[in-house]
Amino acid sequence: METNQLLSYILFTPLLGALLLLVFQRENENEIRIFGLSISVITFGLTLMVLSKFDSINPGFQFVHKVPWITNLNISYHVGIDGLSLLLLLLTTFITPLTLLSSWKAINKKVKEFTFFMLLLEVGMIGVFVSLDLFLFYVFWEAMLIPMYFIIGIWGGERRIYASVKFFLFTMTGSLIMLVAIIWLGVSAGGVVGHFTTDLVELYSVGPALAKNFQNWLFLAFALSFAIKIPLFPLHTWLPDAHVEAPTAGSIILAAVLLKMGTYGLIRFCLPLFPEAAITFAPFLSVLAVIGIIYGALVAMVQKDMKKLVAYSSVSHLGFVVLGIFAMTQESMQGAIIQMVNHGLSTGALFFLVGVIYERSHTREISDYGGLAKIVPVYSAALLIASLSSIGLPGLNGFIGEFLILLGAFKSPLLNTWGFTVFAATGVIFSAVYLLWMYQRVIFGVVKNPKMEHLPDMNKREIFIFASLLIFIVWIGVYPNTFLKISDRSTARVLIQVNTPVPREIPK
Amino acid sequence: MSLELFLFLVFAAVAAVSGILMITRSEVVMAALFLILNLASLAGLYLLLNAQFIAVVQVIVYAGAIMVLFLFVIMLLRPEHEKIVTKISGIRTFAFIIAALVFVQLAYVILKSHPGSALNSDVTASVNAGTVESIGTELYTNYILPFEAAGFLLLAATIGAVVLAKRKFE
Amino acid sequence: MNVDYLVNSLYLIKPELAIASALVLLVLIDLIMGNNKKFLPYVAIAGLIAAAYFIIGQFGMNSLAFVSKSNKGMIIADPFGAFFKGIVVFASLFVVYFSIKSDEIKASFERHGEYYTLIFGMILGMFFMISASDLILIYISLELVSFSSYVLAGFTKTALRNSEAALKYVIYGGVSSGIMLFGISILYGITGSTNLYEINSLIQSSSIPNLTFILSGILIFVGIGYKISAAPFHFWTPDVYEGAPITITAFLSVASKAAGFALLIRFIKITFIKSVDSAGYWQLVDLIDWKTFFIFLSIITMTLGNFAALWQDNLKRMLAYSSIAHAGYLLLGMAVLSNQGMIAIIIYFAVYAITNLGAFFVVMLIANKIGSENIDDYKGLGYSQPFLGVSLAIFLISLTGLPPTAGFIGKLYLFIALVDAKMITLAVIALLNSVVALYYYIRVLKNLFLSRPANGTFEFKVSFSNGLVLVLLAAPIIILGIYFTPLVDLAKNSMQILGF
């Protein structure tokens, strides 16, 4: 197996799997599930192979595979990864099999279509993280919307149609604006490299050379699209609806991976392509991030629906990531990256656990629960760990990310005030309040609802899923260096790209 | 005042007045008769422009054949006195204002453009060549393709008329 | 009188001759065979294939036909015309196939002879419209298309809405072609020529009254705008598209629009151009500010089409409004006034033709069975008829312009042309329009896949040949969405208009 084609194998395995799935009889639901699961496990295995061959000393793109595609526009099939994308790639391929496993029983209608869309979604997610060509990136970015639309719309809750349409329209608006920006950038490339191009490596030299006001517009266009996806306050309104209505598997994927695409985009595109603009807008976006942290936490506190609470906690946590990115120090950026992974694991785990209990009792209202500790002890323990990890208890993963971000933001010469750190830190406290309060109401106290008394505890499959997440939750919490090391050089490179002044080649 | 201008004014006035009378009559036969008058005065205008052939065609085809057909249909169908809508509703006023505006606009533009100052001096030549002979030559040489295309247009129109005439509501 | 030039010219209009002969043949066969109408579609297909063969030959040509001492030429044989004629023939082939399968058309079996003859009348008119270089021929061809389509729009005699559609079509069509004729006469009055090339050289070399010129240009545009259903000349479109038989709706929305756009591009480019600069931008004669004109027209057209489509419950009517919106997008390509914009229009049109034909075909197959075009009656179709559902989904996604479908490529090239011309605001307006469009297209998708089917509504089988045709239309949309180099090469080649 050629090393440089490894990424393409990862990318096309789920696609091939999805196509092969079409020949299955729809009645053989179990075979379909097993097939889908094995495809995603194989993909994960391939990603581990990439990990083993990855050279973390090299700051550049590795496993690069470039094939000319549309020669008229100099568009090529260009994939490659650095430390940042590797971490997110690992997260994606790790979470996908777990979500398929988690929906083993929950999805019992149209299993074939569900597995098909999940595999397509995985192709899209992997594609977004490995593309080194903006056109290719955009195709994956948009193509991913369609499976997600159907996952929410077909297998979702009561108001699923409203939620899926809202999700589609919001993200579509953002991405169309990005499309214009991509084209604009590609056309401007004519003045620097002499031809239209969407190749990211080439564009890294084009973007910084643009005049300041062009950079500003382009930065805003890209940032808007990413901010909707993250979602950054005040563009977050689609998120609670989508999360609440999506099936458990959809929520996990949405929280764990899809939201990361926005923050990934900021680091991969917004900062290095438009450094001057990024520096100009950094304080502004950091303010939005901090507002998001506090707002998300406060709104989460008053939620009556467990899933909605977790959804709003995502707004808060992603605020930390954005703050980390725009503080633009090595620590904060590393913190942001590790926090992306953390959020994927912790919030993924929380959504999963909410799903587990919902499957049994068919309610997500916090007030319907109470006294679960005695009825389902294993579940109670799992929920506790997941909550603590999300809160950021030292020794678990959340702490590392938030600590690094706060530290970096405090030291940041760009933000140049400790105000951001102080306000962001209150978010940590609030998160302890809302999560522990929810925990208290659900797990302790007396059993209010007699129906709840006979709830079965987590079964082996569910324990396995949680245990897999738990390993990494603890691993990152205890020895984060394994992961920090991977992205260290790539982060440093991005920061160099942002801070290196580039001589202007285009006057206007 | 030259005779030409005098004749022009007469024909133009008759055309305009008969046009207005035509659309305001409640009696269908009267309207048709005013249409004939209108078409005939247009033929006079064509003559003044040295377009003899078109003038003759106008009289034979429009004022003659087509109008006979009209009257024939009217007589066969014997329509009752059509009610003319006399109430000037808002939309009619609006339409009238728009029409007046368009008229003023067109008149202004055309008067501004110094009639008779065409770029191509052939215009006068072609006007002088309004005879049957020259039109025939043009049609069968330079304009043979549009002529043939017009043939197909007539064929399509005939077939269309057949389709429409044969239609019955079940 | 030398007749050599006539004979030589005939070689240059072989596609037109093929269509004209097929038309005459159709009339004769209908007369001879009496009630045996089975052969008619096959004669039609044979005629179209012959025309297609000659059209391929025209991709290599670049000359004027019917040139004489006093006339610079009536009709042009060039790659640009060949491309649009190709689109017309492509659409016609499918429409003839649709007609064989359509229950609506089957019902008026005894008049199939007239039906196919009139379709060929339209095709012939469109061919002339696409390649004419003389205002007289342009006007006659426009009327030929219009007359045939008036009758075809009201062809199925039973439906009342059919007659209403036809009547509206006649009235709007009559008025706009009258206005156009008036414009042509003014243009002839001030230039003394009806030949586009001659008018071009005349207005470049001498000063002419500006105001009159603008007037005549705009009056002529009314006729063209009516054919491409640009706002504010679009009022007939929804009614006619909804009322006409689906086969004719599909034909009008693709072929008629193709001919209209070809005429528009040719009219603007040949008549007004001074030169094309090295970056491909057109320097126009400084008489009419076409750029501003097209900018406003495209904004109005696409916004109006998209917003009106939001409220439609009838899928045919919705597609009618969406086709107005697409005319708006295509006009964006005109507003750029560059070769790049022209390439974008050509690419967009090729994609639009395939997609729209496909969408109407699915609508027709479903209407054949359930007798309704109402979007709410499509609930759950995706489950009972996954094949039809998925195909319709592909067509709608392509009309929206999402990757990885060909519709995205069309939009991509339009946006590239706009951004290259530094018309970013216009690009942003266009993309906001796409979001609106997305909303009404996914409303259909929603009914197809997210709603529960009513019991037993869709119990029928799609025949093998229909399935094959559907695949023939759906597959290129995906394939061209992923690998579109051939399409771009074709567009670059088809951009050549004789003389520029």
Image (cartoon, helix red, strand yellow):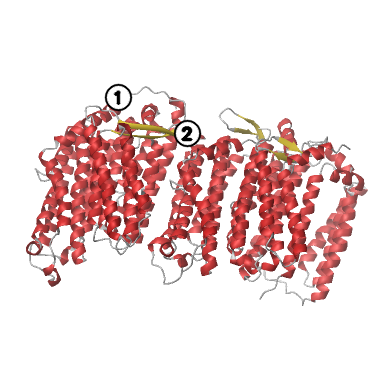
Task: Tell me the amino acid under the disc marked 1.
Answer: Thr
Viewer-side residue, A304 vs C295: A304
**Image side of residue A295 versus residue C80, left or right:** left
Screen quadrant of the N terminus of chain C? top right
Q: Is C196 rendered above or below residue A158? A: above
**Image side of residue A303 versus residue A125, left or right:** left
Q: Is A259 rendered above or below residue A503? A: below
Helix, strand, or loop for circle 1?
Answer: loop
Viewer-side residue, A424 vs A68: A68
**Image side of residue C259 versus residue A150, left or right:** right
Q: Position of residue A267 (x, y in %)?
A: 29, 36
Task: Tell me the amino acid under the disc marked 2.
Answer: Leu
- Pointer 1: what residue? A500
On what subunit does the disc labeled 1 rest? Answer: A
Mark 2, Cα crowd under 10 Å, few <14 / some 14-19 / many 20+, is: some
Q: Position of residue A483 (x, y in %)?
A: 18, 36
Mark 1, Cα crowd under 10 Å, few <14 / some 14-19 / many 20+, is: few
Q: CA distance from mark 1 to mark 2?
A: 29 Å
- Pointer 2: what residue? A73
- Can residue A258 be seen? yes
Screen quadrant of the C terminus of chain C? top right
Q: Which of labels 1 and 2 is toward the front?
A: 2
> Do tags 1 and 2 sit on the same chain?
yes
**Image side of residue A489 versus residue A172, left or right:** left
On what subunit does the disc labeled 2 rest? Answer: A
